[in-house]
């Protein structure tokens, strides 16, 4: 690959957060979908303590791009080197390194360098430079909230036990384009699937605090053989800043457990605007848990009814 490398792009930004915190954000790739706006989903394929291999899905240019990434993590020097190959063709790739340099107390310098292929398969020098600056800014912005991470981040799960075929539960969850006709909190929806298994969904819902319609846009990655639909909201109502998760099916001795996992990042500056001047982060956590939990539980209950009623009709 080194023979194909051409121009190198690199930039450094100051970050008002400890070097260890910034390195932790970069190292914890599984949390990128809720921390970094460009990432839809990240799966770790293997890790030996130093080198890891990832599958990544990112929003780019109005679409979704998948890639496989090899990363070498050096926690002592706070350097992460990476090589990334994009699907579907073998030619497009990116390579480079993140590095974090500690400064005075609670501050650091974050650098990202990226090599530009000679064939231009990942964009022009100007496009790659803009990409580098954008990634640095996204990491800086989220890392500088580190003191309130415990209050801003929340994860939770809801589930139901289904006495019916997993395929029918998955079918209901997959056909989100029909939810306006079947799910009470969904007023309108539009779902397109230009790439197999990659859905772009737009929904008007009334699952918020006031019951007023709120538009949500999402990317959904569908894995039917694994019984999973991973999602990342790309447009969310306040006080939510980011929302990602997955619908899953898990066979058990008693039937099929159908569940939904949510990972949420709250927008601290949006709490008062969305919930009122007296609202606190604790209020926002409680209400967002209630809103999203109610919506996913309603959809899961209908998926359960869809599967179990079909079984009853066949008997």
Image: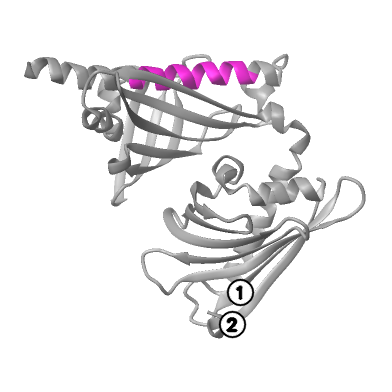
Say if mark 1 contacts mark 2, CB within 8 Å.
yes
Based on the picture, tell me whether residue 185 belongs to the magenta stretch.
no
Task: Between residue 276 and residue 283, name the one nearer to us.
Answer: 283
Distance between mark 1 and mark 2 Cα atoms: 7 Å
**Magenta: main secondary structure:** helix
Q: Which residues are magenta?
A: 284-300
Q: Which residue position holds label 1?
A: 115
From the viewer's side, name the closer residue of 135 and 224: 224
Count residues near mark 1 (Cα–Cα under 10 Å), then give few for <14, some for 14-19, many for 20+: many
Residue position for label 2: 6
- In the drawing, does residue 21 fall left or right of residue 122? right
- Tell me: residue 30, above or below residue 261: below
Q: Position of residue 107 (x, y in %)?
A: 85, 49
Which quadrant of the structure image shows residue 48? Answer: bottom right
Colour scheme: one colour
Instruction: Give the side of residue 119 with respect to residue 183, left or right.
Output: right
Mark 1 vs mark 2: which is more N-terminal?
Answer: 2
**Residue 208 visible from this viewpoint:** no
Residue at the image position 57 percent from the left and 81 percent from the top: 2
Q: Say which mark, if any, is on residue 279.
A: none
Q: Secondary structure at mark 2?
A: strand
In the image, residue 269 lies at what x, y percent? 70, 30
In the rendered view, does 306 fall on the left or right side of 24? Answer: left
Placement of 108 over or under 299, stated as above or below: below
Look at 50% across and 77% down and name the residue there. Answer: 120
Q: Residue at image x 41%, y 24%?
A: 205
Count of numbered circles in the view = 2
């Amino acid at each position: 690959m080194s023979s194909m490398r051409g121009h190198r792009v690199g930039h450094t930004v100051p970050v008002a957060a400890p070097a260890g915190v910034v390195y932790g954000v970069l190292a914890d790739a599984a949390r990128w979908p809720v921390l970094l706006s460009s990432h839809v989903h990240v799966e770790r394929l293997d890790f030996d303590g130093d080198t890891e291999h990832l599958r990544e899905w990112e929003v780019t240019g109005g679409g979704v791009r998948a890639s496989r990434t090899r990363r070498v993590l050096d926690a002592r020097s706070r350097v992460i080197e990476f090589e990334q190959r994009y699907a579907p063709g073998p030619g497009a790739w990116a390579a480079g390194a993140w590095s974090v340099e500690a400064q005075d107390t609670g501050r650091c310098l974050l650098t990202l360098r990226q090599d530009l292929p000679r064939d231009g398969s990942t964009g022009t020098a100007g496009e790659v430079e803009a990409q580098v600056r954008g990634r640095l800014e996204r990491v800086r912005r989220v890392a500088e909230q580190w003191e309130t991470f415990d209050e801003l981040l929340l994860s939770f799960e809801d589930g139901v036990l289904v006495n019916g075929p997993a395929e029918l539960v998955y079918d209901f969850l997959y056909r989100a384009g029909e939810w306006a006709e079947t799910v009470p909190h969904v007023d309108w929806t539009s779902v397109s699937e230009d790439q197999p298994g990659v859905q772009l969904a737009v929904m008007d819902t009334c699952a918020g605090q006031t019951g007023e319609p709120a538009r949500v846009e999402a990317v959904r990655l569908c894995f039917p053989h694994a019984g999973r639909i991973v999602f990342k909201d790309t447009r969310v109502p306040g006080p939510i800043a980011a929302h990602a998760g997955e619908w899953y099916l898990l066979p058990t001795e008693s039937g099929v457990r159908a569940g939904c996992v949510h990972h949420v990042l709250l927008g601290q500056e949006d709490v008062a605007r969305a919930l009122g001047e007296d609202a606190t982060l604790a209020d926002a956590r409680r209400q967002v848990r209630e809103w999203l939990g109610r919506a996913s539980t309603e959809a899961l209950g209908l998926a359960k009814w869809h599967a179990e009623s079909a079984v009853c009709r066949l008997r």
